[in-house]
Image (tube, rainbow, N blue to C red):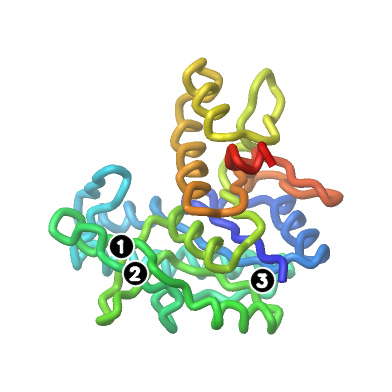
Amino acid sequence: MKVLVIKCGGSIIDELSPLFFESLKQLKRSGCQLVFVHGGGPDINTMLAKYEIEPVFEKGLRKTTDDVLNIVELMLAGKSNRSIVHKLTLNGINAIGLNGSDGKLLAGDFINEASLGAVGEINSVNTELLYMLLDKGLSPVLTPIAITEDGRKLNVNADMAAGAVAKALDAYSCLFVTDVKGVMKDGSIIEELTERQTQDLISEGSIYGGMIPKVETALSVLKKGINEVMIVSGKESFYNNGQFIGTKFVSEQEVMN
């Protein structure tokens, strides 16, 4: 089974274009099975503001008290997930939305409960359940909510959750859907980069601003043992006539081979 894991950030969900969905349909027709993991940062921040709760981040991770966790799960499972599933269904993708904690799809541990609260990392993925859904022609859409052995829910960074799912399913690629086509230089997409090449582009200023965290996230997921990671656009076509359009990140070893 050829599995592709696709991570959609919360900020891109409302901007996904018809061309993006056409790329998904082409991938399905080519025999790919699609699994989605999504975030929901903007929606979560909006709801926190309504409750006058100030968002707190430490090293990019949202400090998650019990009150924050309730809002995180409400917005991820009740809004962001519903929105993506609806859009996929309207565009001919037979999708099913699931909370990551359902059926222990995503099992995890606390990272540092004392300083971060209910923030976790994934230690196992219920691949049997995911494969069963894929076998039925369904594309799972997962929230990055994990559950501990004793039943406590955890807020997981969506990028890292996508990476964990991709590794567990031995996906051939993990796509990060953003508002850009990929890493650009002199007006053209750089189709493939290693970590060393990426760091060189950052040093020389070719990768700058908001693109830096995007590529650093891709590299951090690649280091988890994923075959390859790509940055692609959700605003236009990212796959056409059997070719991906975006920047692929590969390990130095992969290039040497």
Q: Earlier in the sequence, mark 2 or mark 3?
A: 3
Q: Secondary structure at mark 2?
A: strand
The residue positioned 33% from the left and 75% from the top of the image is 147
Structural distance between the alpha carbons of marks 1 and 2 = 6 Å
The residue wearing badge 1 is 120
Residue 166 lies, in percent from the top left, at 55, 61
Residue 55 lies, in percent from the top left, at 24, 49
Callout 1: 10 Å neighbours few (<14), some, many (20+)? many
The residue wearing badge 2 is 108
Residue at the front extreme of this rendering? 257
Residue 149 lies, in percent from the top left, at 29, 79
The residue positioned 65% from the left and 38% from the top of the image is 247
Disc 1, disc 2: CB below 8 Å?
Answer: yes
The residue wearing badge 3 is 89
Structural distance between the alpha carbons of marks 3 and 1 = 30 Å
Q: Secondary structure at mark 3?
A: helix
Q: In the rendered view, would you say 68 is above or below 202?
A: below
Amino acid type of the residue that numbered disc 2 sits on in the rendered structure: Gly
Q: In the rendered view, would you say 252 is above or below 90?
A: above
Q: In the rendered view, would you say 187 is above or below 220?
A: above
Amino acid type of the residue that numbered disc 1 sits on in the rendered structure: Gly
Residue at the top extreme of this rendering? 204
Instruction: Say which mark, if any, is on residue 175.
Output: none
The residue positioned 49% from the left and 39% from the top of the image is 214
Callout 2: 10 Å neighbours few (<14), some, many (20+)? many
Quarter placement of the C terminus? top right
The residue positioned 65% from the left and 22% from the top of the image is 185
Q: Earlier in the sequence, mark 3 or mark 1?
A: 3
Residue 169 lies, in percent from the top left, at 58, 68
Callout 3: 10 Å neighbours few (<14), some, many (20+)? few
**Drawn side of residue 118 relative to residue 212, left or right:** left
